[in-house]
Image (cartoon, rainbow, N blue to C red):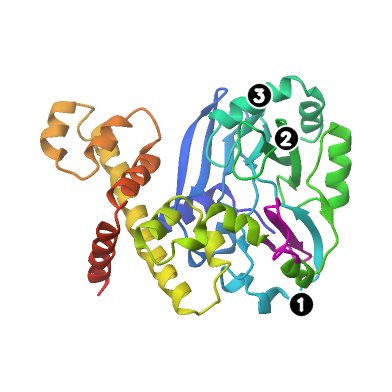
Amino acid sequence: MNLPTYKEALEITENSEAFYVQRGVIEGYVYAMFNYRLAMEKDFIDNKAWELRGLTYILDGETGDWVCYPMLTKFLNLNQGLTTQYDVVKDKEIESVEYKEDGSLISLLVLPNGKVVPKTKMSFDNDQTTMVKKWLLNTPSVEKAVKENSNSTFLFELVSPKNKIVLKYNKTELRLLQVRNTISGQYASSKMIWEHSLHMGINSADCFVKTLDELIELRETLENVEGWVVKFKDGQFIKIKTEWYVAAHGLMDDLSQEHKVIAMILEDTIDDVLGELENGSEEKVEIEEIMGLVDVYYNHRVDKAYALKELYLTTFNEVRKDFAIAHSKSPDFAVVMKNLTTDGIAGAIRDRMLIELSHLEKAREFLETLRGEDA
C-alpha cells in the first residue's frame, strides 16, 4: 500500500480534471492538499489515486522535504463498482469489521514544529475543526499520544449532536477509526487501534467478527446503524450500508427524476444508491451514464473558473475594470469575482448547478445537451 509521492500526486491532478490540489499556509507552513471533486470508479484506475482523499503534504522549511499526512483511502460500497461486486470480494479473508460512524472524518497532524492541528478531508478551518479544537482542550491525552507517535496519522470520526447527519449522538467526541504509517501508508491492526484508544482514554469504532454473508443478511433488518466498514487482509476496504440508513436518506425514492439524481451526484450521496442497484441493470446503467455526464461537465466548469481566476491575477494584474470588460460574459464570472481571496469556487459552482438544475425539465434539457455534445 504505497502512498504517492508529492510529485506523483501532482501528476494525477495534471492528468485528470476529477482531481485537484489546494494550496495554502497553516501555522506558517506551506501545504498542498490533494482531493477529488466529482469522480467515478474509472477515475481511480491508478491505484495511488485512491489516496487523493484529503492527502496532505506540508513543506518542512528546514529540510525542504514535503512531509506526507495520509487520510483514509477512498473506498466504495459493496456492489457499487466493478472492484466491490459481491462475486469479486466474497472469498476474500476479512481482517476486521467496524461500525461506520455517522459524522465527519478528522485527522490530527503533527507539524514539523511539534504543534498538533486538526483537519477534515478538505480544510484546516471550518466548523468541524473548530469543534475539535475545543474538544481537545478538555482531552489533553489525545494530543499527547498523537505527538508521541509523530510517524503515524491518527484518523477519527467527529460525532456530535451539533454535527448530526442521520444518527443521533448525545455528546461531542472523537472516536478513533484508523492509524496509518505516514511513510508506508500501512494501516494499524484492530488490536493496535484499540490499544491507542485506551491510551488516549477515548472510544474507538466498535469492531466485531462477522462474515460478509452475515452482514448482508443483517443489513436488511438492523436499525439505528449506518452500516459497517469491512477491511480485507489484502488491504481493500468496502462499505456496507443498512437498508434502514438508505431509507432514512430517502435516496431510493427519486431515481426516476433526473433533477434529483443530479442533486445526489453533486451532494455526494449517489454512492449509497449505486450499492443498492443490481450491476448491469437498466436503472444502474442509466444513473452511471448521468454521473459520467455530470462529472465531466462539473469538473471542466470548475477548471475553467480557476483558469479565469488565474487570468485575473496574472494577465490582468488584478485590474478589475479591464478584466470585467473582457470576461464579464463568462458563465461563472460572478463566482470568480466573489472568490478572489478564497478557495470557494468549486463549492459555489456546485451550489449554482443545484439551483440551475432544480427543476425536472431543466435537468432533462441539460442532460440532452451533454449527450448531444458527446455524439
What amino acid type is highlighted by mark number 3?
Lys
Q: Which residues are magenta?
A: 218-239
Q: Which residue was labeled with disc 2?
A: 174
> Which residue lies under the disc numbered 3?
133
Q: What kind of element bears circle 1? A: loop
**Amino acid type, mark 1:** Asp
Residue in the picture at 39% in, 57% down: 260
* Residue 205, position as x, y percentages in the image: 78, 46
Residue 142's label in the rendered image is none
Q: CA distance from mark 2 to mark 1?
A: 33 Å
Residue 73: % across, % down? 63, 54
Q: Quadrant of the C terminus?
A: bottom left
Instruction: Please tell me which residue is depicted at 82% across the width and 26% down the height of the picture.
Output: 141
User: Which residue is the site of mark 1?
Assistant: 91
Give the crowd class for mark 1: few <14, some 14-19, many >=20 residues within 10 Å.
few
Q: What amino acid type is highlighted by mark number 2?
A: Leu
Vertical comparison of 279 with 270: above or below: below
**Label 2's element?**
strand
